Image (cartoon, rainbow, N blue to C red):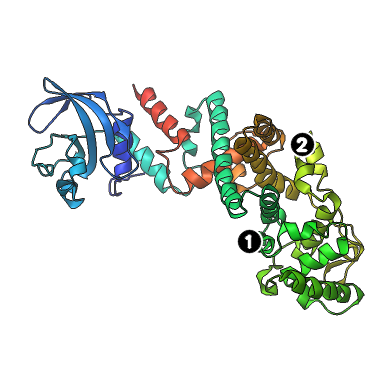
Amino acid sequence: MCYKFSVMKEDFLHYIWANSLLKNRELTTYTGKKVEILQPGSYNRDAGPDFFNARLRIGDVILAGNIEIHLKSSDWYRHGHHKDKAYNNVILSVVREDDVRVYTQGKAEVECIELEYADYLYNEYLYMRDTMQQPACYRRLELLEDPWFYLTLQSLAIERLERKVNDIRKILFQTKNDWEECFYRLLCRYWSANVNSDSFYQLALYLPYKILLRYIDRPYLVEALLLGCSGLLETAPDEPYTSNLKKEFQYFRKKHKLWRMQPSQWKFMRIRPEGFPTIRLALLAALLCRFGRLLSAVLSASSLKEVLLLFDVQPSVYWETHYIFGKESPYKIKKLGEESRKIILINAIIPFLFIYGKERGEEKWTEKALDWLEETRPENNYIIRAWEKQGFVFDSAMQTQALIQLRKVYCDPHRCLQCRIGKQIFKNLCLGSQ
């Protein structure tokens, strides 16, 4: 496959420079001075020169300063560096094509070299960037050693966990460090495990946990509050069960000045009946009433099996013969399935335990979170199956969470040169060519 007409991006040149993957080690400036790279510098992702604190020998002089990399020398002017004093300490301009002399804002001329690289590296980079196949590096995966690969997955899993922790911090800030309210909102977000997650989260905002706690010994009323604030109760036909729920909700809605969602915010299409929002709301009511302070029950769980059993609840009798209001169905006990429990565990409970331990300085919670993540069975989705197709085997949710992080943060945005796996492949390609 030929890529010679593809548009090069500077990130490839950044990678070549940072990792010293130069085709020609004998570098010479346009003035004929030899350049020896002592330290390539630290990559800068913010404003300013591309690499800070590099050390070079140019001619007979050792210089310390910054490096700027462009496709063409003329990009120096196009980007306005000649007017920016932040670039006065640039000691070398590194380019693919040297087409013009460049000067700093202080009128000092900047030495320049043309960067050469092996064609096979650039072709591999372009293939990874442009292919629709996933993972994009699939044809070079044999260059990775299994121990290194699985160890890298651990760090990617922690990276994904930290991202979730940052999201929880925002909720904790919004709840003024109320751990129980924060956990309730997080649980609601992942309670439906489908397209209704945003609606469940909004419901948690409309109906605070502290209000539900006041009536936790009255399951019927908790159902009325959840179904009423969801707006779904409004569309229910009158029958003994729904009429009593409406009556209770109207009274407590006025008492607590509660907001009510629009029924149209909830999705029923393309969802299995067991996942209908009506069923999930009834199950949520049963869960809250069973444990009262649910967070305490989660924190008290001594094993993964025990915490999963917390979600072994059943809704009220009405829902044994209904999936939606007013339409009777064959008798069936409604429960959360194994996959739904796993989603709640991975996305709500484990990240919450992790941040709970970090914020309180208690390692036992962070260790428990990591232990449970490693004990949880691997997920099964299109991301995981793409890697399994390449012959990899995964035995825990920690590994599969790492693959999701890899796909969403590196593969989908084509950040192969920032990806640990991508960088290792390029490194091994170079070693193999020597």
Q: Position of residue 310 (x, y in %)?
A: 82, 45
Is residue 23 shown to the viewer in this render? no
Give the residue number, with chain letter if any, for mark 2.
304
| Apparent side of residue 20 relative to residue 408 in the rendered image (left or right) | left
User: Residue at horizontal 7%, vertical 31%?
Assistant: 31
| Apparent side of residue 341 relative to residue 83 in the rendered image (left or right) | right
| Apparent side of residue 254 relative to residue 109 in the rendered image (left or right) | right
In the image, 306 versus 402, the foreground residue is: 306
Quarter of the C terminus within the rendering:
top left
Q: Position of residue 158 (x, y in %)?
A: 57, 36
User: Residue at horizontal 71%, vertical 35%?
Assistant: 372
Amino acid carrying label 1: it is Asp
Q: Which mark is residue 125?
A: none
Residue closest to the far bottom:
238
Quarter of the N terminus within the rendering:
top left
3D distance between C-alphas at marks 1 and 2: 27 Å
Give the residue number, with chain letter if any, for mark 1.
198
Q: Quadrant of residue 405?
A: top right
Mark 1 closeness class: few <14, some 14–19, many ≥20 residues within 10 Å: some
User: Residue at horizontal 56%, vertical 26%?
Assistant: 146
Q: Sequence order check: which comes first, mark 1 or mark 2?
A: 1
Asked if the residue at tag 2 contacts the one at tag 1, i.e. Cβ–Cβ closer than 8 Å, the answer is no
Mark 2 closeness class: few <14, some 14–19, many ≥20 residues within 10 Å: some
| Apparent side of residue 330 relative to residue 151 in the rendered image (left or right) | right
Q: Position of residue 155 (x, y in %)?
A: 54, 32
Q: Element at badge 2?
A: helix
Q: Quadrant of residue 233?
A: bottom right
User: Residue at horizontal 87%, vertical 77%?
Assistant: 243
Q: Element at badge 1?
A: helix
Is residue 382 shown to the viewer in this render? yes
Q: Quadrant of residue 102?
A: top left
Amino acid carrying label 2: it is Leu
